[in-house]
Image (cartoon, rainbow, N blue to C red):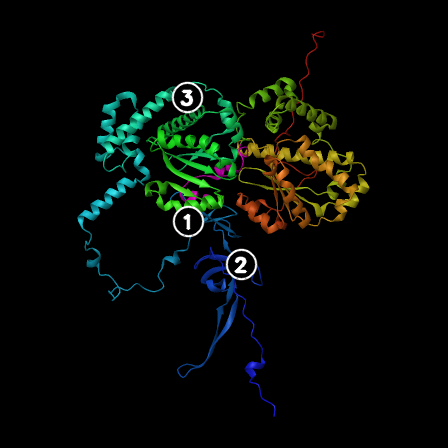
Amino acid sequence: MATRIPIAFRRGPRRKEKAIELVKNWNIVRGDLVEVISGPHKGKQGHVTGVIRDQNRVIVENINMHHRYVKATAAAPGRSYLAPGPIHYSSVNLVDPSLGKPTRVAIRYLDNGEKVRVSKKSGTIIPKPEALKERQTPRRTETGIFDTAPEDVLERTVPEWEITRLLTMATVTNLALGEESQPLTTDDQKYFDAVKEQYGDVITEDFGIRVARAFRAQKKNRMQVTINETKRILEWRKQFQVDSILTRELEQSKVYFDCWPGSIYGEDNNGHLITVDRISEIQLEAFQKNFGHIDQLLPHRAQYMERVQWEKVAISKRMGRRVYKHICIVDLKGLGMKHCGPSVIQHLKPIFDVGQLYYPETLHRLYLVNAPMVFYGVWKVIGSLIDPETREKIQVFKELDKFLDEAQKHALHLQTSASRMSTDVENEEGQPISAEDQPFYDALVAEFGDRCTEDFRIRVTRAFRAEKKNRLEVTVSEAKRILEFRERMEIDTILTRELDQTKLFNDCWPGFIYGEDAKGHLISVIRISEIQIEALQKNFADVQLIIPHRLQYMERIQWEKAAISKRLGRRVYKHIVVVDLGGVGMKHLSPSVVSQLKPIFDLSQLYYPETLFRLYLINVPMVFYGVWKLIQSFIKVEVREKIVVMKDTAAFMKEIQSKGVTLDALPMYLGGEHRGRAMNNTFKPSIPDIPPPVPPPAQPQPNPAES
């Protein structure tokens, strides 16, 4: 007799529902005005009446209406009504109140630390709706069993001695930002008076205030410690003649700053100066070779610290209040075993100790960024062993992005500083020529005079810093080679004349420029899939027929950068290049194609030095990406830092937006909002009537015989 199997067992295993990946950070809240950007209701606007966070959906008033049915009950008959249905979070965007159009938003922090939503299209702050402040459930007026009565709240249960102890601890920890500009407390005044009585006019008022506040943690012998430490610091200053160190040239000063470049940047809202030290820039071998004894190093570090103090005096005068603290950022990127050897530590530790030992109470906050995993782990262990006052000043970050988020909360304006932590020369375009570069600039002026523009001289001066031995000779010879090439190709007039087959070339190889990054760097995009290889080879058999067209393209980019410089009020001579390798196949790698395209791509490197800010290679094939990973370690650091290789568009968009480039500056086909400007004969710079960036024509000299 057959056995009957229950139906529940005949169905087989049930499928598990796929878990929904929930949105972590919601930028849309109840009461917001939004617009549907996809689906059958695209273009409709309405207010959000509810959010369903566990389904990534929102309910928008009068949009996506559905019939709802209420079943009949004994008390009421059944009925149907219209109600809005849920819409996916990704299908709606906030409406920019200044434009009335949908926009993506970014989260920013105001000077007071308030978190706000900012439109990426216009920069307008989109405030949270007032409806959020209204309580959906009225607040109860009567006191419940779990409530605290008003009289119980006001009852004082802390004894007087505990309040005194807490106030004393708050004074000792000294976390108040505004203390620098405040007069000394009654408790600190006696230490200041003792120091002044002991040393008189030898110490400045600023020094006396700092020393009076520096040793509060000394409970038993604070007076003795304060006087002894002051004596030790003054003896050290006398030994190294620190009081006159800013007025004299130290031996091997240039060598020291080549081995350890020191830079100061902006300030936070309280006027605290920002200094940055990059471990990767410290040339250890040169340090140990040129400075055998630590006493040779200390005067240079003391001079650096005195310059920092000098700048803080200027800040104090500008702000009308005393500022004697600064912020120090130490970039640990590149920290390796070579930095941890006994001989290296013997050299570097006393230099870092100068600030702590001889400049007390001058550090406001210390940020250690790009910390290796081992360093970060060790800090987590020993951080709890450090006294709270010091620990509050030190923060360690594994990633630069997390540091920037934290710094923004503390009102550090680090847009410029963060990019300099990647490379020192990213923001030097608008700066004057440094004293180190000036001789090379002067040599170009003496050799070529008015044959080259100011922009050209500055670029060539800075382009060959890697040439350590024969930099001057290389700079002059390369400038001569470029100028001869420009004369031979008549580049100075290439924007004013029509080239042969120019329309055909632009059809075979379309060129477009888009927006700019936060620093004004123009973005140009080359799509390999748009280059018509067959037509290019058919109509331009000789590469010399293509080069003039590519030169015209490069000169138009220079022309637009001249317009950007005028608009921003500072020099901008670099641009960003995005090369989209999507669609690259074997036909692009044949010898005939490579021999034709390579000289064209080489033009910017050979004849437009120091014009590339960053090169993005996106949608690269897997083989190319693997080869790049192998060869990148053999490429010079300054070149490698400019090249970014991405396997897909999403990774590129995330990377470039993290660099401060907004969607309205990026191509629409990549997910941006810019339509692009064609680089053909219709091109005009963004500022009308701006002259092309070429030297003015030489004025004819009068003939003495005729006169």
Q: Residue furthest bottom?
A: 1
* Residue 34 visible (yes or no): yes
- Please tell me whether mark 2 sits on a helix, a strand or a loop: helix
Judging from the image, what secondary structure is the residue with disc 3 in? helix
Query: Is 417 in the magenta?
Result: yes
Image disc number at residue 360: none
Does label 1 or label 2 sit earlier along the sequence? 2
Verify CB contact (< 8 Å) between mark 1 and mark 2. no
Q: For the residues carrying marks 2 and 3, which lies nearer the camera in this image? A: 3
**Nearer-N-terminus badge (3/1):** 1
Q: Quadrant of residue 219?
A: top left
Q: Quadrant of the N terminus?
A: bottom right
Residue 115's mark? 1
Look at the magenta stretch and give its main secondary structure. helix
Quarter holding the C terminus is top right
Above/below status of 317 relative to 75: above
Residue positioned most to the left: 160
Query: Which one is earlier in the sequence, the residue at label 2 or at label 3?
Result: 2
The amino acid at mark 2 is: Ser
Residue labelled with disc 3:
246
For the point 51% across and 46% down, the residue is 122
Whole-percent x, y for residue 206 in the image: 31, 28
Q: Which range is magenta?
A: 403-427
Is residue 101 among what the camera can see?
Answer: no
Name the residue type under label 1. Lys
Q: Secondary structure at mark 1?
A: strand
State the residue in front, 190 or 25.
Answer: 190
